[in-house]
Image: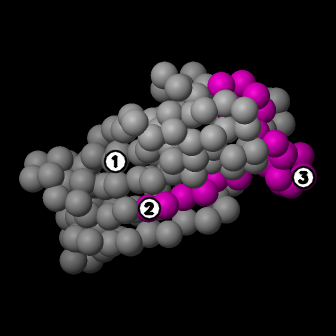
Amino acid sequence: MRFHKLGNIQMEKKSHHKWPIRVYYEDTDAGGVVYHARYVAFFERARTELLREKGFSQIALLEQDVAFAVRKMNLEFHRPAVLDDSLIVETVINKVNHASIQFHQSLYNSQNGLLLSEANVVVASVSKQNMKAIRLPGFIKVGFSCE
């Protein structure tokens, strides 16, 4: 079992959150292959659904002046996804810092299990008012602590 230090709290590495996605025509280029920028949208949707599963509404967070902004994203493409593929995004929270959350995301073809793409993403907590970095509210840290 891996643990990450969160201030004075030990945070267990999270189990995988899984989110299904279907490739539609709008996601592909003229050759029927998923356009590279669409992977960013797939990963974003999966992170949003992870937040929702943890009980966090982005609208409610915005009302409390808490927003999230991608600070860093590294993508690696292994194999293409194509029109009508059934995909699954696995998201793991690797680390929770004072003002950011680090995610590792993997995109698989759900029919054959092949790894298609991976992303390492750092999402910063920012004020909705001025878009400057702010500390993650305690209730968010608690929400991402050991299950």
Instruction: State the SS at label 1.
Output: strand
The answer for how far apart the CA atoms under marks 3 and 1 are is: 32 Å
Residue drawn at x 17%, y 47% as measured from the top left:
110
Determine if the magenta segment contains residue 27: no
Amino acid type at mark 1: Val
Amino acid type at mark 2: Ala
Mark 1 is surrounded, within 10 Å at the Cα level, by few (under 14), some (14 to 19) or many (20 or more) other residues, namely many
Considering only order in the chain, which callout, 2 or 1, is on the residue closer to the N terminus? 1
Answer yes or no: is residue 71 visible. yes
Q: Which residue is mark 3?
A: 130
Tell me where residue 131 sits by quadrant. Answer: bottom right
Residue drawn at x 84%, y 46% as measured from the top left:
134
Q: Position of residue 88 (x, y in %)?
A: 28, 46
Closer mark to the observer between disc 2 and disc 3 = 2
Mark 3 is surrounded, within 10 Å at the Cα level, by few (under 14), some (14 to 19) or many (20 or more) other residues, namely few
Q: Which residue is mark 1?
A: 89
* In-image side of 62 versus 55 (left or right): right
Residue 119 marker? 2
Marks 1/2 in contact by CB < 8 Å: the verdict is no
Looking at the image, residue 82 lies above or below residue 142: below
Looking at the image, residue 131 lies above or below residue 66: below
**Which of the image's four quarters has the N terminus?**
top left
Answer yes or no: is residue 57 visible. no
Residue placed most toward the observer, 64 or 114: 114
* In-image side of 118 versus 128 (left or right): left
Q: How is the image coloured?
A: one colour
